[in-house]
Amino acid sequence: MKVLVTGAAGFIGSHLAEKLSQRGDEVVGLDNFNDYYDPRRKRANQRRLERYPNFCMVEADIRDRQGMFDLFAREQFDAVAHLAAMAGVRNAVAHPDLYVEVDYIGTQHLMDAARAAGVGNFVFASTSSVYGDTKQIPFVESDSCDRPLQPYAAAKRAAEILGYTYHHLFGLNFTAVRFFTVYGPNGRPDMMAYLVADSITKGVEIPLYEGGEMYRDWTFVDDITNGVVAAVDRPLGYEVINLGRGELVRLGDFVSIMESLAGRKARLRPAPKLAADVLRTYADIGKARALLDYNPQISVEEGVTRFWEWYRDNVGA
């Protein structure tokens, strides 16, 4: 199979591209290497991926509509795993125009290029943030998701809806996989796990929202990418599917696990929950189990251990 992975130099995208390359797919990665965080991290991921003879990286921007059409016409992909996005809930509040331009309009460019080239399956990386401050716990895909709290979630939800339209009108197989609090090696430096590790090792003060009484469905990156690979392999018409661990874990407990591994405390400053954030995320993963044979394997304790060992050995403790 020939697969395009957008955002392939990023955190989740690089893990996915490597997994597909390892199993023998022909993988084309696409990334624009923007400076939302240090591009050298993405270049390191690129070097890791380019060890595989069946992988190549294309440096391009999904906002370049004609460039996307040219790429799809030239490469003739069997499937697309679209992970490229402007990420970060808080940054989206400051730059809503950028998030709509990249996460919504850029996705439309890719869908148009995919249908013009006859791509068999389009998998879109969405987010648990689309649920907003829902009262339906655990989060289930049948929720209307019509009250997003910030532009990142709004743009992702809009792209999901457009995916249905493209399926209905043009027959595009479109699966939106909603990620729940992904963490693991090579994580972005603005993500909570990385911030905690930095606080422990470098003495950086970080906010602990609501005294740690916030809950997340922490999902290890290998489990997430297993779910995405399964979605790539299964054209399903139109589906929206949660990918999480299916377990509520208190933020304060997540921090404590890492502190125990490090033998040191993080520098934590009490802070109230932000208006763009929610108290809990919690995935119902029954649909993923049924449609994708999805079965997350990595407990939070094991996942934090793996993350900490990577951070200690590669970033420095």
Image (cartoon, helix red, strand yellow):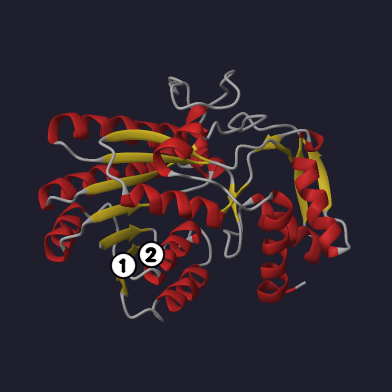
Category of crowding for the residue at label 2, using alpha-carbon neighbours closer than 10 angstroms: few (below 14), some (14–19), many (at least 20): many
Eyeballing the image, is 195 above or below 293? below
Residue 170 is left or right of residue 190, and the answer is left
Residue drawn at x 51%, y 50% as measured from the top left: 224
Location of residue 299 in the rendering, given as x and y in whole percent from the top left corner: 68, 50
Picture disc at residue 257: none
> How far across and down, in percent of the image, does residue 60 sit?
29, 64
Where residue 313 sits in the image (x, y, percent)? 70, 75
Pointer 2 residue = 20
Which quarter of the rendered picture does the C terminus lie within? bottom right
**Vertical arrangement, residue 130 with respect to residue 190, above or below:** above
> In the rendered image of this protein, does residue 282 appear above or below residue 199?
above
Quarter of image, res 176: top left
Q: Are marks 2 and 1 in contact (CB under 8 Å)?
A: yes
* Residue at (34% x, 57% y) in the render: 6
Graded by Cα atoms within 10 Å as few (under 14), some (14 to 19) or many (20 or more), the crowding at tag 1 reads some
SS for callout 1: loop
Q: What residue type is labelled 2?
A: Leu
The image position of residue 195, as x and y in percent, is 69, 55
Is residue 83 among the parts visible in the rendering? no
Q: Name the residue under label 1.
A: 25
Locate residue 73 relative to residue 277 in the image: left or right: left
Residue 268 visible? The answer is: yes
Q: Nearer the viewer, residue 13 or 98?
A: 13
The image quadrant of residue 19 is bottom left
* Image-based side of 20 in relation to 105, left or right: right
Q: Distance between the residues labelled 2 and 1?
A: 6 Å
Labels 2 and 1: the sequence-earlier one: 2
- Secondary structure at badge 2 equals helix
